[in-house]
Image (tube, rainbow, N blue to C red):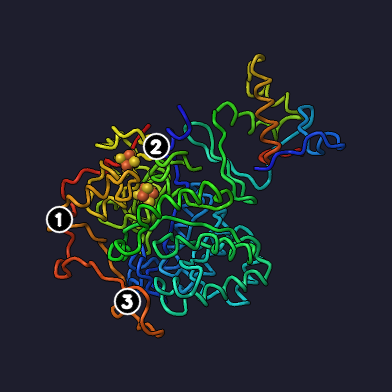
Amino acid sequence: MTAAPVGTAEAAPTGAFDPAAPYRLAESVSLRPESFGALVYDFHTRRLSFLKTKPLVRVVEALAHHDDVHGALTAAEVPDDQRDQYLRALAGLAQAGTIQPR
Amino acid sequence: MKLVEHFTHGLTSPICLTWELTYACNLSCVHCLSSSGRRDPNELSTDEAKAVIDELQRMQVFYVNIGGGEPTVRSDFWELLDYAIAHDVGVKFSTNGVKLDKARAEQLAKTDYVDVQISLDGATAEVNDHVRGPGSYDTAIRAMENLYEAGFGQFKISVVVTRQNVDQLDDFKAIADRYGAQLRITRLRPSGRGADTWDELHPTQPQQKQLYDWLVARGEDVLTGDSFFHLSAYGQELPGLNLCGAGRVVCLIDPVGDVYACPFAIHDQFLAGNVRSEGGFRTVWQDSELFAELRGPQSGGACTKCSHYDACQGGCMAAKFFTGLPLDGPDPECVLGNGETELAKLEMDTIVPKPSLDHSHRTTPQRKDGPVPLTLSVRRPDKACDSDPLAGEGRRLPAGVRVN
Ligand code: SF4
Ligand code: SF4
């Protein structure tokens, strides 16, 4: 794991997560449903990771069908008081390349 | 529930599936986990192998570790490789390098979703060839050169750590760096022909500590296949799942389609079914009684009292089984020495289970290079006893495995 450079002159990294933009599961990534959520496999990086809850799987799957991330959260019936938590999780997934802007 | 607890109950499909395509091999490594050498006449046909790949695609098994034997000596190997990749099943294959000439290396460099793992068990020809046979070091190095020159990218060099090569870990790393490869080191298990040579090859107690220290200090970008979790009892947990995945996230499909709980457990007692039977691999994985038992609660026996149990979990089921130790006790390489104590207690006439299958070449190739520095004695139990004396006996399965 390499730490992101901090305090350099560059502004926000170009791939920064924007919940107002449309996203989708990355092209090279597949989800396999499991009892806890889903197994995530990136055929490109050959990395295996996990979506640890079923609601998060529903949100990720909904991304492709909505104009922005907020829409996907609404469609997946994420309660208001959990939205921040989900946005943080999705930002992490975007950074890991599991989801990508479309 | 923590993620790892879900793993102990099994997943809808395996994560770490090994598929040995053939028992045929050009070499006769003295520690071969599958006692390979001669092809089995009953091996899966090309069509049957493709049907397995179709099933893996439906089950979303995203990648398989293909091995053998030497998988590349199957004439349809490259066809099956392409078929798997075209069906969303990525491939990592293990090879001694015998078929990786310049043309194949270039072909592989152009193929996505394939990973190559070259086996090397000594950083020098002397140490390597002692275990893998004369000329095998040069073959492996040539294959690495070919992959490097073809621009394949990061392939893997796979080393089984032994008493003879544990001092060479830095040298292995240097070889990997030279070819832009990643080093993978794994544990020697007393499986297959490894049962016969275990006493002479497995690292001594001080060497195990040395290995642990090396992993902690230098192991960051070194792969281990999660195989050293018994060493976690020295102190800090090593990265990885730290559990025996047999039948839970790990399994083996052997060349004749038999499904075993783990590639290191080729024995009737760990045989879950066959991909040729009705329902195919999916039914074996999801419904076999053996796997259900492996995914159920386990007793750690004497180990549960050990303060290292959380990290070590009593070690490796296969290592215990093939050294004749009870499955619900310490690993033969228990870092506290409890395994050695148990081994010493075993009666002289204890029948140590041996692999159910043996495809070894009937004659071992002559060593060309004169006397070797070490002798390998063979601890082969009574050859007259063909059938396995323990098959179907009441030895409880697989108590050494723990559920959190
Ligand atoms: S039996 Fe040993 S090698 Fe097989 S999964 Fe368990 S710990 Fe790993
Ligand atoms: S006694 Fe058992 S749990 Fe403790 S270190 Fe030895 S093998 Fe591991």
Q: Residues within 10 Å of mark 1 (few under 14, many from 20)?
A: few
Residue, disc 3: B361
- The disc at residue B350 is 1
Cα distance between the residues tagged 1 and 2: 31 Å
Foreground residue, B236 or A17?
B236
Q: Marks 1 and 2: CB-CB under 8 Å?
A: no
Q: Secondary structure at mark 3?
A: loop
Chain to which the residue tagged by mark 1 belongs = B
Query: In this rendering, do the residues under marks 2 and 3 share a single chain?
Result: yes
Q: Looking at this rendering, what residue extends furthest in the front direction?
A: B206
Cα distance between the residues tagged 1 and 3: 27 Å
Q: Nearer the viewer, mark 1 or mark 2?
A: 1
Instruction: Tell me how many marks there are.
Output: 3
Instruction: Name which residue type carries label 3.
Output: His
Q: Give the residue displayed 54% in from the left and 63% down from the top.
A: B172
Which of the image's four quarters has the C terminus of chain A? Answer: top right
Answer yes or no: is residue A92 visible.
yes
Q: Is residue B324 left or right of residue B46?
A: left
Query: In this rendering, do the residues under marks 1 and 3 share a single chain?
Result: yes
Residue B301 sits above or below residue B132 on the image: above
Q: Residues within 10 Å of mark 2 (few under 14, many from 20)?
A: many
Cα distance between the residues tagged 2 and 3: 38 Å
Residue A86 sits above or below residue B129 on the image: above
Residue, disc 2: B8
